[in-house]
Image: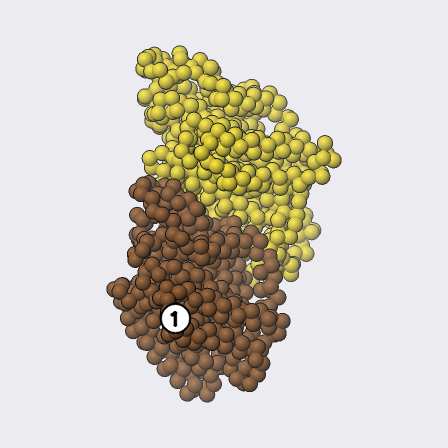
Amino acid sequence: MSAFASALPLVSLVTFLPLAGAVLLVFIRGESLKAVRAAALAVSLLTFALSLFLFFGFDGASGLPEFVERASWLGRGLDYHVGVDGLSLFLVLLAAFLTPIALLSSWRAVGDRVKEFSVFMLLLETGMIGVFVSLNLFLFYVFWEAMLIPMYFLIGIWGGPRRVYATMKFVLFTMFGSLLMLVGVFVLHAAHHQATGGYSLAIADLAGLALSPALQTWLFLGFGLAFAIKVPLFPLHTWLPDAHVEAPTAASVLLAAVLLKMGAYGFLRLGLPLFPLAAASFAPALSVLAAVGIVYGGLMALIQKDMKSLVAYSSVSHMGLVMLAVFSLNFEATEGAIYQMLNHGLSTGALFLCVGILYERTHTRKIADHGGAAARMPVFAGIFLVVMLSSAGLPGLNGFAGEILCFFGVFAANKALAAVSVTTVILSAAYLLWLYRRVLLGPLKDPGDPRLRDLDKRELAYLVPIIVLIVFMGLFPGVFLRKLDASVSRYLDAVKTPAAATLGLAPAPERGQTAENRAELER
Amino acid sequence: MGSPLALAPLLAVTAGALAVLLLEAFLRKKDSEAPAALTVAALLTAGFFTVLSWGEPGLGAFGGRLVLDPLARFLIVIFVALGVFVALMGLKYAARMGLALGPFCGLLLLAVAGLMIMVSTGDWLVVFLGLEVLSVSSYALTGLRLRDRTSSEAAAKYFLMGSFAAAFFVFGLALVFGTSGRLELGSGVPGAAALAGLGLIVSALFFKIAVAPFHMWAPDVYEGAPTPVTVFLTIAPKAAGLAVLLRALSPILRAEGAAAVLSPALSAAAVLTMFAGNLAALRQTSLKRLLAYSSIAHSGYLLVAVVARDAAGLVFYAAVYLFMNAGAFGVLIALSGRGFERTSLDDIAGLGRRKPWLAAPLAIFLLSLAGFPPTAGFLAKFYVFGAAVREGHIALTVAAVLASLVSVAYYLKVIVAMYMREGEAEQEPWLEEPALYLVVFLCLFGVVELGLWPGNLLTIIRQALPGFF
């Protein structure tokens, strides 16, 4: 197993196999929808199978990146450098797991330009995985930006009536943040060159720079804005409901499940470890924004009339909790945040799939147009129930395990915000159960509607794996959390030691010798 | 006399120009493609001689008035490639639009000769010589669609404004020579009169490069000129003018006194240019005019390289811009019909369905112009803006990336038209233009290759231009 794993460039394979598949698809004839769909699904399933080798081969004892591959690319520190550690491993798996599901879910919904659709979905998968596995800041940025292109096309071509507006808003919002981050990349590159005389953009090298507090503040603002828009953190969330409502189901699934995680992942991978002093001083303010997002997203979800925008606002609320946990800067909260990202990916992805299934049958997403569907679709009602309870955090399912860790961690950091954040349990139960009652229970809205048939085999094939995982992750969180422990400890050391040293709480002799560099940078 | 190799590229192009113009007199067949073939041959010969002398640090001729140094060689190679692209693009276009191919090719070669003179000298007077050879040929090229009013109007406008610029240049030259007695590029500016003279010369070059506020002529001229000529005008005079500015200003930018005035002024011009180009492009409904404004914005990005004194970045950006801009205009030419051009956004609505093999390259060129990774346009911006940050111009860089954000909106607007709107179902036939498709393919290859594996070119550039400053 490990011999096999070490013989192959596994991370590169997982990252670029979808890209290779996309190139292949361009050159096969687009007339045979069956062949195109089967080929795309096969490529994404193979990618998922390969990513499982990462999961089983991952040791996690050291907390350092594993499966590392490094090659010179453009020179001057712009290297190809990939690997996975505890922070990124499960996000890679999540992207690889959900892409085939999203592709399978689109088989009926997308009938136009299927080849192009499949190509963009596979390109998106490469972009998403690439962001998570990059250990070089330049490579990270390339994937971060490149991934916008397929999402732009997916929403813009296969989306709803206001798709052009939604997709432009999505791209311009995201790019605004990331272009300022680009300036930060230049500054870091120059700062590293000044401090060491060499060239590097390896994230580990950059974390070793002792940047001046003023410089850290500016850089944190640049990077933080890019990540906060992506999460999205209140009040930068306005692009999200538009993008979600207009996107086709498959794109919504990946947008909610994976793309939003990139923002939180950006804070964990770059924002906090690279600029620990600034992070420490901004954490309280950002925590408050995150807490506001929890309540605001929940309340907005309550009053939505469109099922998709309800789920979109629930994402704002749930990601608020994740961000609050990230900014709490302690062990439980950080593990909870990472675990909760996966849970949110699964349950919100599944919620979008369920909404998509209803939409395919009735061609309306308005809550008021639905009612009593459970009578005709009992299996669907059962699955929807599990998904919904997972999202609401019912004990025994995955959402509970993540939320409880987050709450413990947040409580240790700030009791008032913990009290605010617990409202997410009440709010999400309220808007989800109410949605369930209005859509699935009660008298059948249109008893003669022949379109309300229960799930077919294809739909079961993509929903059941999610349900199994939801239950499994709820019952055995240790299987996953174990792999995180060492990485999270290392991450917290990187974030907290410099801040403590500045405040005079702990001796940090190795930081003393960099005082010269710091003085040089300040000039 | 100096080394004959230093003169060989220039001689090849000039001889080619004369031969093409003479050939015109003896040709029986009106629609012969011989002039284009001769043009390509002359350009490739020039390119061959340039590459042949690659190892030599700097070859001189005419007592050092003409110097073939690494920067000149890079730019000459770019001009040769551009000339070949334009000649191939114009081959069938000339026949369809009623252009005379002989004069088109002859003037093109003369313009390239002017460019070569401009970039391979360290003497203001020789720069002026090259500039005028370039300008006169450009005026004529712009007005080459004789029966088309916009073409003639563009030529007249370009000529009038260009003459003013030439006058500025000469007057500035007189001031510089009169006060300092020197004509070398990069010599210091003692006193206010010389500084004013330098300012006039820089303004004249800004005019050629289309830097705001001297850019007003550019959109009309770029739109009115025959499209292959537009390709030439949006790339070549910019690259040459910026190279001259780089040679002239980088020693001054490094010195303490004059840099305090010059550096903020150049930065302001760069920011103004980027925003003037990008904001105006937002409102365009003609793709040709949109690309014209976009090329003004790119003048601004390129000017950032001058402010940062980054010769390597300038060369790389110019090479990348050659591919992405020529490619985008190449697709535009492939859309034109007999005797008319299809340039409005309505014309390309639904192109993604009608002609996917033209729409996809255009989309990639536009994404590259917008600076999305992993295309070459991203790397070009990355290196130029990165150099600006290294030199401490953080505010300029922030302005530049925000300007790029504005540009994303209109480049994506074109993609929206191609892929997210439905056009008329009418199927125009494919044009039988293998040469044009070859150019588009080469540009596509360049944009992808330089975006993903630019390692070789970067190594060559870094080896050749390390000690430029």
**Which type of secondary structure does the marked residue at label 1 adopt?**
loop
- The N terminus of chain A lies in which quarter of the figure? top right
Whether residue A240 is visible here, answered yes or no, is no
Q: Which residue is mark 1?
A: B27
Which chain is brown in the rendering? B
Which chain is yellow in the rendering? A
Q: Position of residue A268 (x, y in %)?
A: 56, 41
Q: Which residue is depicted at the point 34% across and 41% down?
A: B421
Q: Position of residue A142 (x, y in %)?
A: 53, 48
- Type of amino acid under label 1: Leu
Q: Is residue A352 left or right of residue B155?
A: right
Up/down of B357 relative to B436, above or below = above
Q: Which residue is depicted at the point 50% across and 62% down?
A: B319
Front residue of A257 and A196: A257
Q: Chain of mark 1?
A: B
The color scheme shown is by chain
